[in-house]
Image: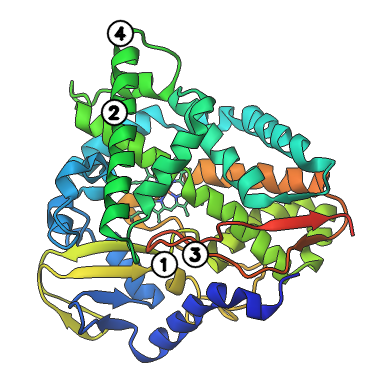
Amino acid sequence: MQTPSYKEQLYAPYEWYRSMRATRPVFQDPTWGGWQVFSYPEVMRVLSEYATFSSDNQRMAQFEGGEGGMDPIGNSIIRMDPPRHRQLRNLVTQAFTPRIVAQLEPRISAITHDLLDQVITAGEMDVVRDLAYPLPVTVISELLGIPAELREDFKRWSDALVSGDEGTSEEERMQLYQEVQGMYGYFAQVLEERRAHPQNDLVSALLAAEVDGQRLSNVELLGFCGLLLVAGNETTTNLLGNMMLCFDEHPELVERLRANRALVPGAIEEVLRYYSPVKAMVRVTTTETVLGNQHMGANQFVVAWIGSANRDEAEFPNADRFDIEREPNRHIAFGRGIHFCLGAPLARLEGKIALNALLDRLPGNWQVADQPLEMIKSFIVFGAKKLPMTWGA
Ligand code: HEM
């Protein structure tokens, strides 16, 4: 088990959130003028009131170094307001139905067991490297119809898409830019191939999807592939890694879950709340408004701290307690409103399959190595880069 001093980086943001919720739950940062929102009801409003808190890429780009234009994710649904958001979301929802997701169960299970086969005899693994990363990336690449051999490229691309927010040098930025361009070049090729030879995969379904005789444009298709790659990857990796951190803090739960699998779905929901894999989402105000007694002007950048809202005592009694039977558990780890995560059923399914497989295959107690945690450098996702662990004790 990790000693608390080795987890300082893990706990630090939660201490900051707690003090901000208590003192300045809606706060205009004097250094850069943007707003930061920490309390549950206010974060819910920012995420769901799209008419006041816009996701539009043009509005965002002015605060993000004007790079919005080069980036197809900037042209994807996560960076759009209605009515265009509604049209495109309807289109992609057609290709990404709960039925398609449910059909993936046997395949996700097979991938999970194959991954565990490779480490089981060693009696140790890095749960990020050996399971939490390869599982979702393999699922997404199969969904998109892209060969799993490109996994390593995928990893670099999706890392490039979520990094670069904190302490990135100009040189690193250029490198990231080139990685991202490489990825779009690759997807453009795949689109051409599938257009010529449609197959039974998500890319072909996206190419065929129509609403009112309208199809996705090339840039929108690229944006959606890029979005799925990031949204479906880093996030689910961190759900699985963060799950291990929760069990490391509560080792007794492993035996309880092993004996009672009905508790598995609740445990996954609680991981999503307790160490939310997406810690923040951003919006821009379209008009003046009042939020948590604070007057906000129009055209202001707003950071909604999901990680903080999910620990708000006013919504979650004993919010800092990890309780797999928490009822109700109205966490907002998948967002709220029109942008609610399209991949939530898939993420939940992967979490359930992975946890059940771990409970079946890793006997005894689970122990995360007592080493300092290195957290991912990102403003959006929350998780550890490595989590070496052993079992069987
Ligand atoms: C534990 C895993 C995941 C978490 C915590 C997560 C979290 C989120 C959040 C918070 C949003 C809302 C964004 C906003 O309001 O601006 C979102 C949107 C989205 N997510 Fe996820 N996600 C996860 C997994 C996935 C997966 C597996 C996929 C797809 C394969 C996916 C696809 C999407 C898409 C396409 C959107 C945009 C929806 C829209 O704008 O209408 N996510 N996700």
- Helix, strand or loop at label 1? It is helix
Upstream in sequence: badge 1 or badge 4: 4
- Which of pointers 3 and 2 lies earlier in the amino acid sequence? 2
Q: Determine the image quadrant of residue 303.
A: bottom left
Q: CA distance from mark 3 to mark 1?
A: 9 Å
Residue where numbered disc 1 is placed: 306
Which of discs 3 and 2 lies nearer the camera? The answer is 2
Q: Looking at the image, which residue is at 63% across and 33% down?
A: 108
The location of residue 150, given as percent across then percent down, is 48, 29
Q: Secondary structure at mark 3?
A: loop
User: Is the CB of the residue bearing disc 1 within 8 angstroms of ligand 1?
Assistant: yes
As measured in the structure, the alpha-carbon distance from the residue carrying label 3 to the one carrying label 4 is 43 Å
Q: The residue tagged with tag 4: helix, strand or loop?
A: helix
Q: In the rendered structure, which amino acid carries the disc numbered 3?
A: His
Identify the disc placed on residue 315.
none
Name the quarter where the C terminus is drawn. bottom right
Please state which of residues 270 and 233 is positioned toward the viewer in this rendering: 233
Q: Residue furthest top?
A: 197
Quadrant in the rendering for residue 194: top left
Q: Which mark is residue 331?
A: 3
Q: CA distance from mark 1 to mark 4?
A: 42 Å
Point out the frontmost of discs 3 and 4.
Answer: 4
Q: Earlier in the sequence, mark 3 or mark 4?
A: 4
Q: Position of residue 277 (x, y in %)?
A: 49, 59
Q: Nearer the viewer, residue 185 or 365?
A: 185
Disc 4 target residue: 196
Identity, as a three-letter code, of the amino acid under mark 4: Ala
Disc 2: which residue: 185
SS category of the residue bearing label 2: helix
Count residues near mark 2 (Cα–Cα under 10 Å), then give few for <14, some for 14-19, many for 20+. Answer: few
